[in-house]
Amino acid sequence: MLKKLLIIVGVVGVAALVVKKVKESSDERALWHEATTAPDLR
């Protein structure tokens, strides 16, 4: 029982790290897009 619980906790922890990395990457990509596109001066 304890072994199953530890496996589940490990999988959830890894999934949380993956989600965090994907979000950080997305945020950084959006920031670069905003910084490198010409402003709309209409």
Image (tube, rainbow, N blue to C red):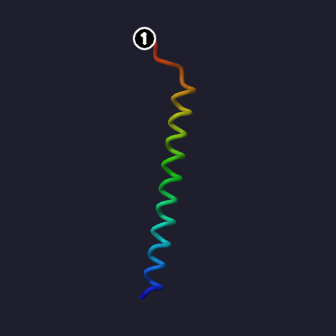
The relative height of residue 15 versus residue 8 in the rendered view (above or below) is above
Q: Which residue is more in the foreground, 31 or 4?
A: 4
Identity of the amino acid at label 1?
Arg
Q: Secondary structure at mark 1?
A: loop
> In the current view of this chain or complex, which residue is farthest to the front?
2
Q: In which quadrant of the rendered view does residue 32 lie?
A: top right
The relative height of residue 2 versus residue 31 in the rendered view (above or below) is below
Q: Position of residue 17 (x, y in %)?
A: 51, 59
The relative height of residue 19 versus residue 26 in the rendered view (above or below) is below
Q: Residue at x 50, y 18 (%)?
A: 39
Q: Residue at x 44, y 76 (%)?
A: 8
Q: Which residue is more in the foreground, 24 or 2?
A: 2
Left or right of 36 on screen, residue 40: left
Q: Quadrant of the C terminus?
A: top left
Q: Quadrant of the N terminus?
A: bottom left
Q: Position of residue 20 (x, y in %)?
A: 49, 54
Left or right of 1 on screen, residue 38: right
Q: Position of residue 31 (x, y in %)?
A: 52, 34
Q: Position of residue 6 (x, y in %)?
A: 47, 79
Q: In which quadrant of the rendered view does residue 9 lie?
A: bottom left
Q: Residues within 10 Å of mark 1 (few under 14, many from 20)?
A: few
Q: Which residue is mark 1?
A: 42
Q: How many marks?
A: 1
Left or right of 29 on screen, residue 12: left
> In the current view of this chain or complex, which residue is farthest to the top?
42
